[in-house]
Image (cartoon, rainbow, N blue to C red):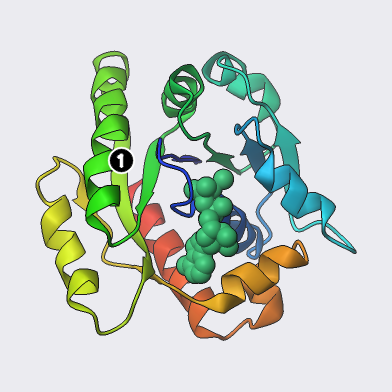
Amino acid sequence: MIIGVLNQKGGVGKTTISVNLAASLARNGARVLLIDADPQGSALDWAAARNGDPLFSVVGFPRPSIHKEIGQIGQGYDHIVIDGPPRVTDLARSAIMASDIVLIPVQPSPYDIWAADEVVKLIDEAKVYKENLKSVFVVNRKITNTAIGRDVGEALAAYPILVLTATVTQRVVFAEAATQGKSVYEIDAGGAAAREIEAVKDELMGFL
Ligand SMILES: Nc1ncnc2c1ncn2[C@@H]1O[C@H](COP(=O)(O)OP(=O)(O)O)[C@@H](O)[C@H]1O
Ligand SMILES: [Mg+2]
């Protein structure tokens, strides 16, 4: 499965979700590749911060030809996660075209909900060429027991894209893990953050 984690908006959690989702897929013994398609190279920085054995392979490929080269780059892997770039449209378009499913992280904020229309447009365009392309929103940095946290799903319903039931809460463990190039599983395997990522993975798997 090729999962593209995309949103033209920066800071929504693309890299955070990409590395932890890749870790979650790799936990069952699958061979997983994380492609860093962001010229800023945050996923590569994450891998560089790590001591010890890698959980999965990470390569940088911030070029608008991912969709053409994914077959070659992804050879021998069971699952591929693409950590998408912010802003750069041609890179995002290529990453979308390379994906089986596009996962769009959005924060529970009106700015994020409005900004999502950019990636939704790109997905619409891509569907002309790739009829079977799937796409879903995932709410990230949800703050428990807030009205905005509850209403975000409703606000996103204005888009013709499903919202995952699984959500990812604002938790400091995500940043703490990243500092050490680790996934939340390695910090707290049975913890709430790991369970949320697991639920996102399971729901995504159900789509394919
Ligand atoms: N669920 C979360 N809980 C706490 N911090 C988060 C969460 N998701 C992302 N962050 C933090 O928000 C910032 C932006 O996240 P990042 O994954 O880099 O976004 P993007 O890749 O979309 O730019 C980072 O500092 C990251 O640690
Ligand atoms: Mg990023």
Q: Residue furthest front?
A: 111
Tell which of 37 and 98 is nearer to you: 37
Residue drawn at x 83%, y 60% as measured from the top left: 50
Q: Is residue 110 visible?
A: yes
Residue 51 lies, with reference to residue 169, above or below; the image says above
Percent of width and height locating residue 126: 31, 20
Along the viewing direction, whichever of 145 and 99 lies nearer the viewer: 145
State whether label 1 is within 8 Å of ligand 1: no
Residue at left offset 71%, top offset 75% = 186
Say above or below: 65 vs 197: above
Q: Amino acid at mark 1?
A: Ser
Specify the quadrant that holds the C terminus. top left
- Position in image of residue 11 (x %, y %): 48, 51
Dividing the picture into quadrants, the one containing residue 118 is top left
Within-10-Å neighbours for mark 1: few <14, some 14–19, many 20+ = many
Residue 15 lies left or right of residue 92; in this view the side is: right
Tally the marks.
1
Helix, strand or loop at label 1? It is strand
The residue tagged 1 is 135
Could you say where residue 125 lies in the image, as x and y percent from the top left?
26, 18
Q: Image check: 14 left or right of 58?
A: left
134 left or right, relative to 187 = left
Q: Residue at x 63, y 64 (%)?
A: 28
In this rendering, does residue 182 appear at all?
no
Residue at horizontal 49 percent and vertical 83 percent from the top: 192
Which residue occupies the extreme right position in the image?
52
Image position, residue 19 (x, y; %):
62, 55
